[in-house]
Image (spheres, rainbow, N blue to C red):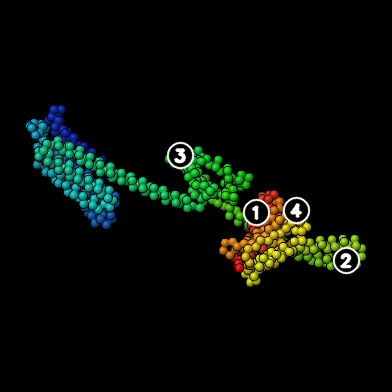
Amino acid sequence: MARSIAYFLFLLSIWQMDIAFLYAGDFFSKTTIDVLFRIFRFGPIMGTPLLYYIIFTIYKTGLINKSTRNYYKWVFNQAVFYSVLLFGFLVYYFNFTSSGVVELYQIQENAAFPAHYIPAYGALNITFYVNLVLIFIESFLLLFICQKIEEVKIRKFFRALVYASLFIYLNGILGGYMVYPLFFSNLNAAFAAIILFASYFILQNATIEKMNRELKEERSFLEIILNNNPNYIYVKDSRNEFVIVNEAFARLFKISPSKLIGVKVDEWMKEFLLIEERLNLNESVFNSQGEKRIVEWRFLPIYFKGNHHHTLCLGTDITKRKKDEEMLVKTENLRVLGEMAAGIAHEIRNPLTSIKGFIKLLDQSVSESSEKYYLSIVNDEIDRINEVVGELLFMAKPQASVQFTKEVSLAKVIHDVKMLLDTTAILIPATIDIETKDNLSTFTIEEKQLKQVLINILKNSLEAVPMDGRIRIKTEKMNGHDIRIRIIDNGEGIEKSILQKLGEPFYTTKERGTGLGLTVCFKILRENNGDIQIRSKERMGTIVDIILRGSLTK
């Protein structure tokens, strides 16, 4: 469109020079003026094919609807354009012959008109008049087709172009026939050009506004996509400063995305980065909002115009994946342990039964108290071995996932366990307090299994608390139908490195421990759709949460 307007103004300027040379008698000879007039007559003659070219451009660029284009394709096509163009060159050729323009003769100066030359036309100048008629026909065609343009601003512009074209050619004809001075057509052309420029400026301004509006909408759409992406995304520049940050990344640090723009990436990250726990170059560990998050990164260079000034950083939270991998390792360890335990327990229990029987026989046959004392020690140690073998057998025994029909009262189970361990607590001394809310009960776990879990955890707490220590047991409802049993002690706490290994088979910090107590607890709860969550701080104590999911409450 801009190219068509440029051609139109170019031909208009040539036409005005053509008229100006007719008034140049004081500067050029008649022969020179005659040659220049014929050359610059290119402007008004070639206006006809140019106007059709503008119409054809509107038609083929899709500014009008498809049905209109199909209906009028016999009028607006390349064959017609080339025919009009060929006719224009033919008229221009005749212009250089005596059949087109015979000569120039001078009009003397008078009160109404200054001295100037006017052409004397030959017989073939009729082709020029046909060319003018075509100009008016094409102007009305342009006016017709611009009514089919859907965009209002573009439609108004082409209307202005039609009016300017008609105005210029009408004034040219009236000036040529001496209705008023010929040089008035120069002023009229300038006026028409101003109108055309103003219309084009309005059109371009509207187009730019539309483009800006579309760009804003696209940017808003891209921002929505960026911020709805659950992955962590940011872009940094060559100065290592944040340029773009999505909401997921900002939420990781509990800050607004706009506040990160312009901040140094390394300086910001080091406040939250746990360097001692960094796994590899592409993984980072953040302490975000009191929770450890493991993020896997990909860094993609952004090349713009051949230069690399920005880097796209994509982070995926793999915390759950890492936990799942650790769980798979633990599950595999338990499976291997189960296979080993079945064989070991079978091989150990048989000779133990015989040894225990012979110990009883020896105990009956001896009378010395010292010998009886030694035999009692041997018997206790055999019982201890049996206890270890029993735990091994529990690990080996596959547990069916069933829905228990017997209701288990949490308050009763907790009080029974407390009575069992009160004697141990008195020896420390320590206290066990129970804080229960409502009368909570569950069908999701057997009473014997729940007691085994509580005994194992409370025994660990009793071994951890100092003199006059305190252990609290709380029960409460959680979201939905879940129940939480919380055990809190004020013991020495657990080191961070040890906390991560709790529940692994045979891992223990006790001198005479087997490393199977917590492993059994994890196994029992996992097979009953439950969970254990352990939090601890050194020299402050430990909190153990036993989660019973899908429990019925009363």
For label 3, the SS is strand
Q: CA distance from mark 4 to mark 2?
A: 39 Å
Looking at marks 1 and 3 on the same chain, the residue that comes earlier in the sequence is marked by 3
Q: Which mark is residue 363?
A: 2
Residue 406, position as x, y percentages in the image: 65, 71
Q: Quadrant of the C terminus?
A: bottom right
Residue 395 relative to residue 323: left or right: right
Q: Is residue 81 visible?
A: no
The amino acid marked with disc number 1 is Arg
Looking at marks 3 and 4 on the same chain, the residue that comes earlier in the sequence is marked by 3
- Give the number of the mark in front: 2 or 3: 2
Q: Residue at x 28, y 54 (%)?
A: 65
Q: Residues within 10 Å of mark 4 (few under 14, many from 20)?
A: some
Q: Residue at x 28, y 51 (%)?
A: 151
Q: CA distance from mark 2 to mark 3?
A: 91 Å
Q: CA distance from mark 3 to mark 4?
A: 69 Å
Looking at marks 2 and 1 on the same chain, the residue that comes earlier in the sequence is marked by 2
The amino acid marked with disc number 2 is Asp
Q: Which mark is residue 307?
A: 3
